[in-house]
Image: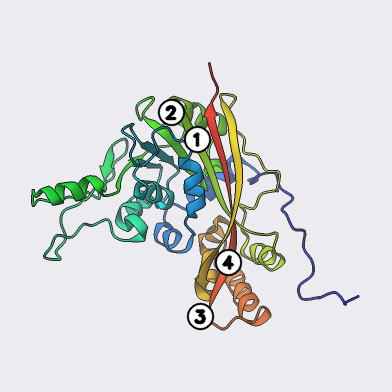
Amino acid sequence: MSSPDSLNPPVPPVSARDEPRFGSDERKGALAAAFQDQGEDYDRLRPGYPPAVLDAILATVPGAEPRSALPRRAIDLGAGTGKLSWALAERGLDVTAVDTSRAMLETALRRGPSGGSADPTDSSGSLASADLTVSSGSLASAEPADSSGSADAAGAALAAPRLATHVASAEDTGLPAASAELVTVAQAWHWFDAQAASAEVTRLLTPGGTLALVWNMLDVTIPWVHRLSRIMHAGDIHREDFSPTVGPGLELLQRSVHQWEDPMPTPDVIDLARTRSYVITASEERRAKVLANLDWYLHEHLGHAPGSIIGIPYRTDLFLYRPSAA
């Protein structure tokens, strides 16, 4: 029998928590507010969503077939910097990204589809006008503008991904009832009042519409990743049997788990900790300690060369719901 590794002792393969815990509503509010000014780092460092997850979501949406003449509208609650919002827009849906953070939504409009810029360019290479103003209770659009008036330009504009933003809470969006075939929430449901948000989702969905709750999590079934998550203070790790709290008007259609890897250079893996609420709200001394521990773990303990690309294993948990029949 091999001797135990004192530097890397075995760890439980799953979290012991049923869902994120905050201690108090005040603590929950403080941690949620910590993301308000982290748009650029969050967008650069947090992973997107694998194609299989998007496929699974769209398979349940009425009219989601590419040639369908039915409306294809989505509302992304707690949209943040629009990672899921833009991915859905690129699949042909008209998406409204909703968040309480104006700064996050402005980042979403700047990033554009596939992480590019939402500022359209004309043939001369100069920037065409794009509305990046986001005001409470109103919509701002990142649909590309083109003043040439040509048929080709008009067709391109219609085919381009379309995303609007709306500053509001998930519990009270102020958007019209029955205005979307799909409502999505990625990395954010645990920040909401589940009962109030569930009621709002039910109001927003058209008959037969779908709610998709999505979480990307470090795959802690892999021991070195579990230790990485502990050092990083990743608080969004769930138990294998985790089930989100939703209101009584929503019925679970399907749950699926998707495992994949996100390649990142080691400095970005270290900086990933800066997007965690624990690290954002920590003192300078504690934050520096966390980052130094990650540097040691990646470069000395695991032996990765500084700046090398490593695959960070993730799992994406997807829960699909539909409003209960009356």
Give left or right: position of 142 versus 290: left
For label 1, count other residues whose C-alpha is less than 10 Å away and answer few (under 14), some (14-19) or many (20+).
many
Q: Position of residue 138 (x, y in %)?
A: 28, 37
- Residue 9 image-quadrant placement: bottom right
Q: CA distance from mark 3 to mark 4?
A: 14 Å
> Tag 1: residue type?
Leu
Q: How many marks?
A: 4
Task: Identify the residue at the far front of this view.
Answer: 67
- Residue 312 has which mark? 4
Instruction: Choose between 106 and 58: the one closer to the eye.
Output: 58
Residue 39 picture location, percent across and down: 41, 57
Residue at the far top: name it: 326
Q: Tag 4 or tag 3, which sits nearer the N-term?
A: 3
Q: Residues within 10 Å of mark 2 (few under 14, many from 20)?
A: many
Between disc 3 and disc 1, the foreground one is: 1
Find the distance from the CA under tag 2 to the CA under tag 3.
45 Å
Q: Name the element at disc 2.
A: strand
Identify residue type, mark 3: Gly
Count residues near mark 4 (Cα–Cα under 10 Å), then give few for <14, some for 14-19, many for 20+.
some
Give the secondary structure at mark 4.
Answer: strand
Q: Amino acid at mark 2?
A: Leu
Q: Residue at x 58, y 33 (%)?
A: 253
3 or 4: mark nearer the eye: 4
Instruction: Measure the alpha-carbon separation of dots 4 and 1.
Output: 28 Å
Q: Residue under label 1, please give it.
A: 211
Tell me the residue that label 3 is attached to.
307
